[in-house]
Amino acid sequence: MTNDNLRPGGPPAKSVGRTEGKAVFLGTVGVRHIIDKFQADGRFAALEHQMSPRALAAPLHRHHNEDEYSWIIEGRVGALLGDEVLYGGPGDFIIKPRGQWHTFWNAGDGPARILEIISPAGFEQFFDELSGLGGVDKISTEALDELCARYELEMDVDSVPELCKRFDLKFPGEPVRYEP
């Protein structure tokens, strides 16, 4: 039996364990690569984000090329999507469509983890570049502006103090370590 919808030479089947994949900490959120654009022929990327208690993951921002889908694995996560504030717990799914201003955070007093699916793939490399430039703590305004422009991402860094005050958050956060 053949399936004409399957592409010969597509990505191979594989398993990625809980401790596998490149991991970086951006000063706000941990990022573990599960599947990148090369492994999924550019269709999507899957990452795990770890957030310390009450940590804001990012300033308000919007993507021009990617949709993001966040499945909450552990903890309580808040998200601001335009003017709407959403909260979710384990098993809940938050959809962040391209073109919409948004941010997210750990809304609880314990660690939080989400599976982040990015479609199409490619934006996952932003996190590696940001980490290589020192993360949110050390990157210069000029370098951040250039990085955002390359990924067609708008970021409102000035939104951080108000977000932290409004939702009782800290920025940057602390690294979260998980035992397998």
Image (spheres, rainbow, N blue to C red):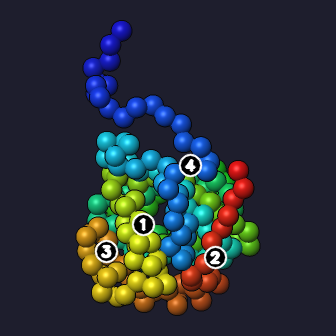
Q: CA distance from mark 4 to mark 2?
A: 21 Å
- Pair 4/1: label in front: 4
Residue pointed to by mark 2: 174
Q: Give yes or no for contact between labels 4 and 2 (Cβ–Cβ under 8 Å).
A: no
Disc 3 or disc 2, which is closer to the eye?
2
- Nearest to N terminus: mark 1 or mark 2: 1
The span from disc 3 to disc 2 (Cα, nearest Å) is 23 Å
At mark 2, the secondary structure is loop
Pointer 4 or 1: first along the chain: 4
Q: CA distance from mark 1 to mark 2?
A: 17 Å
- The x, y position of residue 120, in whole percent, is 33, 51
- Residue picked out by circle 1: 127
- Label 3 element class: helix
Q: Which mark is residue 148?
A: 3
Q: Nearer the viewer, mark 4 or mark 2?
A: 4
Front residue of 152/122: it is: 122
> Residue placed at 44% from the left, 72% from the top?
131
Instruction: Calculate the distance from the C-alpha at mark 3 to the C-alpha at mark 4.
Output: 27 Å
Residue at 46 percent of width and 50 percent of height: 46
What is the three-letter code of the residue carrying label 3?
Cys
The residue located at (63%, 71%) in the rendering is 175
Q: Residue 20 in the image: state x and y as whole percent.
A: 56, 49
Residue placed under numbered mark 4 in the picture: 20
Query: Number of numbered discs present?
Result: 4
Disc with the residue nearer the chain's start (3 vs 2): 3
Q: Are marks 1 and 3 in contact (CB under 8 Å)?
A: no
Mark 1–mark 3 distance (CA, rounded to whole Å): 11 Å
Disc 4 and disc 1: Cα gap in Å?
17 Å
